Amino acid sequence: MIPHYFLYEEAAPKVEPSFLHIEPIPVRSGRHDWTIRTHTHPDHHQILVISKGGGAIEVEGVSWEVSPPSLVIVPALTIHAIRFKPDTDGYVITVAPPFLQSALDNDADLVEGFRIPVRFLPQQIGDDIDLVGLFASLEHEFVWSAPGRRTAIKAYLQLLAVTVRRLLEQERARPVSTARDADTVMRFRELVERHYRNHPPLDFYARKLGVTAARLNACCRATTGKSSLALINDRLLTEAKRNLLYSDMTVNEIGAALGYADPAYFNRFFSRNVGLSPGRFRERLLPGQTRAVAG
């Protein structure tokens, strides 16, 4: 099974799990030969800033190249692995979603910025944002037991969340000719997140968004390179894989949880898109473990 950690290779948290942890990247990655193997954090988001070096971060099977300065957000339960270049520097924040929401006064717009995996590269961040300085100030408060420490940490988290929100808005507005498409796709993804287990038709999403199904499909292709149906299928497959790797649910139970009344249909859907049956996928990624794979 893919390991679940609070901090990498620490099964039991050494700090408050409902609070926050921040450390320089070399502290943990340096002693693991700059390689963080595939794992997940079930109850915490991670936020990374790269100030030197770089590398590749694999998020849900997609590889992201990063170079300084880069900002990466890895939400809770996201499967990820990292291969840093030797001597990479920067910071990693590990934060519990309830604490983050409290720090942000439950501002939905700010909290939303940490719900899906995202990276911002140097050309997106520009020279006007001192992310490394912001992380360094937060780390100073974290290690310094001074009056007002918790309040100061919350204030730096608010600044970080505002920065993330503005970066997201900046990307949605660039270029102007595709801003409306990007906004439509973002709202479409939000709807998919709420309804994908119920398998509504594409017309359902289109009506909710105030566009035709053909227009929705065109927006998705222009923004992501994928059709609207492919994005829905991607979300279903991500959840199916997560349950196959993380849970003891049978394949039939996973299919039912994802809205497939017919186990055979779920098997065909998964096999057609992944190239392996759900049972074979589980066996291949969890070698040596005996699991029930049928209902």
Image (cartoon, grey):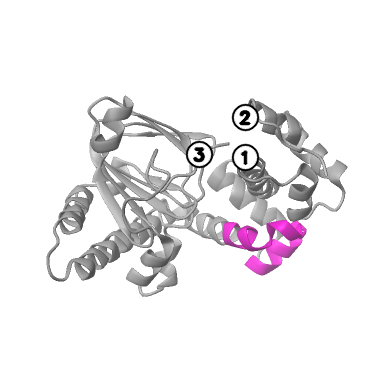
**What span is in magenta?**
189-209
Q: Is residue 147 left or right of residue 131?
A: left
Q: Amino acid at mark 2?
A: Leu
- Residue 143 image-quadrant placement: bottom left
Q: From mark 1 to mark 3, how far is it between C-alphas?
A: 10 Å
For disc 3, the neighbor class at 10 Å (few under 14, some 14 to 19, many from 20) is: some
**Picture quarter with the N terminus:** top right
Q: From mark 2 to mark 3, how far is it between C-alphas?
A: 12 Å
The residue wearing badge 3 is 3
Image location of residue 197, percent across then percent down: 72, 57
Q: Nearer the viewer, residue 226 or 79?
A: 79
Q: Residue at x 75, y 33 (%)?
A: 279
The residue wearing badge 2 is 285
The residue wearing badge 1 is 245
Q: From mark 1 to mark 2, how far is it between C-alphas?
A: 8 Å
Q: Amino acid at mark 1?
A: Leu
Mark 1 or mark 2: name the one nearer the start of the chain.
1
**Would residue 237 be visible to someone looking at this image?**
yes
Residues under numbered marks 1 and 2 in contact, where contact means CB atoms less than 8 Å apart: yes
**Picture quarter with the C terminus:** top right
